[in-house]
Image (cartoon, rainbow, N blue to C red):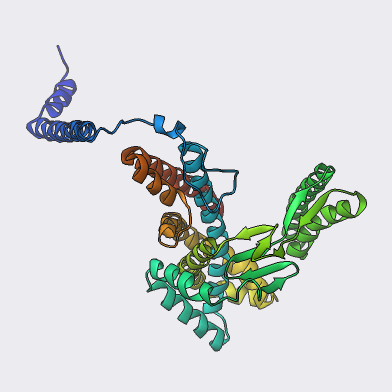
Amino acid sequence: MMSKSTSARLGGLFSYRNLLSCLYQTLTAGIVIACAYYLLLATQENLEARHIESGFSFLSLEAGFPIGDSLISYSPSDTYGRALLVGIINTFFAAILCIFLATIVGIVMGVAQVSGNPLIARMAEIYVEIMRNIPVLLILLFVYGVVLVGLPSVKQAIEFIPDGFLSQRGIFVPKPIAGENFIYLMVALGLGIIGTVFFLKWAKKTLDTTGKSYPTIWISLALIIVPPVITQTIFSDVLTWEVPELKGFNFKGGWVFRPEFAALVFGLVLYRGAFIAENVRSGIVSVQKGQREAATALGLSPDRTMRDVVLPQALRTVIPSTTNDYASLVKDSSLAIAIGFPDMVSIGGTMIGQNGQAIEVIAIWMGVYLCINLIISLLMNIANNKFQLVER
């Protein structure tokens, strides 16, 4: 015979409320599955009616269209898969570069908003309020159609750095070319990075035990830069530079950043940098005033107080909200189609117009954006866990 406790548990399991709840959940799941099955059948029927083949076999067919900006070799005789790979790499490169530059702009403008200088603080506030309240598409169109158009022609290009030129045709900068002894340069750079890691650990341990601090930023930069410079000086044919030269109606050689790419990066950095700046400002304000007072009592300078006391604590508030801005920035990069930059969406749209494989192309778009944002979320969550307070 069953015990009273077992009977009570069975009675609770098969109670009217639990059975009704299970019935509702089963019906809901059935409706979702039925809708998905209906959509699948309707999609197959529509594809057959339009004589469109489904599947990803079209990626092996010849693309037949040119791409203006490509970080890898590409020609119209390459496949659709190669063309889409070019778009994915362009999207990834533009997103990573925008995230890096927008973070720098956000930190500078965020700190400027809480600056003791009223003029600097007010100018930073104006920038943040203006950029956050203008649609990003309008910013991109303004940068591309107004700012870049106002640049000088190729003949009157501005040399903003040695052998680097700025014109209506884009940005032209020297291109590094690896020589036969380039491996020595990579070894020197690797040793410099390893030395920097050990130095930072030693400097932190020394600060915790003795209270003596070192200019870690400048020493780290020296450890990373000096070994490659010495290697370049000692060995020949390590690294050469291909310099852009004006030949005819345009520059030849070097790296070229076309106006579409420059407008995309500049516009997204200005827009998302304002949101990151507001995150930084709110994070700094969230740090208790007593922390600054304690740092001042210990004799720390205002710069070091901000760098070593305020910002590390503010990161606990800044990182979660900035993660959302990074994800939004990646998705905003799809607006590059409005200014003609060949990103993944632009190239995929051309492919849809040629072969009608809309479902497959859109599925690839969704998968790539999902993977990029999941990677960003993973890295930011790791950083967030590192900066959380550990209770004793």
> Which image quarter: residue 38?
top left
Residue 26's spot in the image, x, y percent? 15, 31
Q: Residue at x 40, y 67 (%)?
A: 136
Out of 287 and 89, give the one closest to the viewer. 89
| Residue nearer the viewer, 106 or 13 | 106
Pick out the residue farthest to the bottom.
Answer: 119
Left or right of 287? Residue 2 is left
The single residue placed furthest to the top in the displayed view is 1
Residue 255 position within the rendered picture, expressed as x and y whole percent measured from the top left? 66, 57
Query: Dividing the image into 4 quarters, which one contains the N terminus?
Result: top left
Seen at 42% across and 57% down, the residue is: 337
Depth check, front residue: 157 or 203: 157
Q: How many marks?
A: 0
Horizontal side of residue 289 vs 51, given as left or right: right
Residue that protrudes farthest toward the right in the picture: 234
Question: Among all residues in the image, which is located at the extreme left?
Answer: 16
Q: Is residue 306 visible?
A: yes
Q: Residue at x 87, y 51 (%)?
A: 231
Is 23 positioned to the left or the right of 211 in the image? Answer: left
State the residue in front, 327 or 9.
Answer: 327
Horizontal side of residue 338 vs 104, given as left or right: left
Coordinates of residue 353 in the picture (x, y in percent): 34, 46
**Residue 224 in view, yes or no:** no
Residue appearing at x 67%, y 63% in the figure: 251
Position of residue 92 relative to residue 316, above or below, is above
